[in-house]
Image (tube, rainbow, N blue to C red):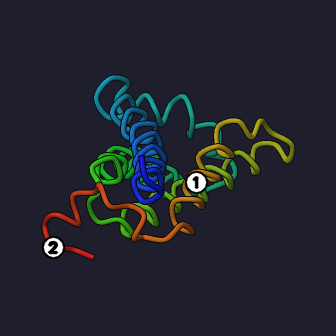
């Protein structure tokens, strides 16, 4: 395998794993648990700290964005839109965990953040095996 294919394989691996992690988490929240249960189990405890409408919006936003942007990232569609949307989810999750406890288990956020940052920082030319490339998007 030449250097170009090795880089493309690395990008496919980063994009594929990260996209699947988010997509499957979003799928579980939207279709298996249901967003009402996501709210009750993860967001309701913040009602004394934040307005309820913000919490409901956040429950829907994070769940749906994980599903849709994760799938887009996995397929290699709308590279920057999906990556930045997932970045907002990571910011929201980091804020929420930090609000609950100043010292918390970073294992939920840190690996995804590292993969997402690597994906955004590595040259787009290395990500040759993505659908955007084949349908004429940059």
- In depth, the one of 3 and 107 nearer the eye is 3
Q: Is residue 56 visible?
A: no
- In depth, the one of 27 and 4 nearer the eye is 4
| Label 1: element kind | helix
Q: Residue furthest left?
A: 135
Q: Residue furthest front?
A: 2
Label 2, label 1: how many angstroms apart (C-alpha)? 29 Å
107 left or right of 10 in image: right
User: In the rendered image, which residue does mark 1 sit on?
Assistant: 90
| Label 2: element kind | loop
User: In the rendered image, which residue does mark 2 sit on?
Assistant: 136
Q: Is residue 4 visible?
A: yes
Percent coordinates x, y for residue 11 in the rendering: 45, 53
Q: Which residue is at a point 57% across and 69% down the rendered structure image?
A: 121
Q: Is residue 73 above or below residue 80?
A: above
Q: Which residue is at a point 76% across and 50% down the rendered structure image?
A: 98
Percent coordinates x, y for residue 10 in the rendering: 48, 49
Badge 2 density bin: few <14, some 14–19, many ≥20, Cα 10 Å: few
Percent coordinates x, y for residue 46 in the rendering: 64, 44
The disc at residue 15 is: none
Q: Nearer the viewer, mark 2 or mark 1?
A: 2
91 left or right of 70 in image: right
Q: Residue furthest right?
A: 103
Q: Residue furthest bottom?
A: 138
Q: Which residue is at a point 54% across and 56% down the rendered structure image?
A: 116
Sooner in the amino-acid sequence: mark 2 or mark 1: 1
């Amino acid at each position: 395998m030449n250097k170009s294919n090795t880089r493309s394989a690395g990008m496919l691996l980063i994009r594929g794993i990260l996209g699947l992690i988010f997509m499957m988490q979003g799928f579980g929240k939207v279709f298996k648990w249901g967003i009402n249960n996501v709210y009750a189990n993860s967001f309701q405890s913040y009602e004394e700290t934040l307005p309820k409408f913000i919490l409901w919006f956040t429950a829907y936003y994070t769940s749906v964005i994980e599903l849709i942007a994760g799938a887009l990232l996995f397929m290699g569609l709308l590279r920057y839109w999906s990556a930045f949307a997932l970045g907002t989810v990571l910011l929201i999750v980091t804020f929420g965990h930090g609000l609950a406890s100043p010292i918390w288990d970073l294992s939920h956020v840190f690996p995804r953040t590292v993969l997402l940052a690597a994906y955004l920082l590595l040259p787009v030319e290395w990500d040759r095996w993505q659908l955007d490339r084949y349908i004429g998007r940059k």
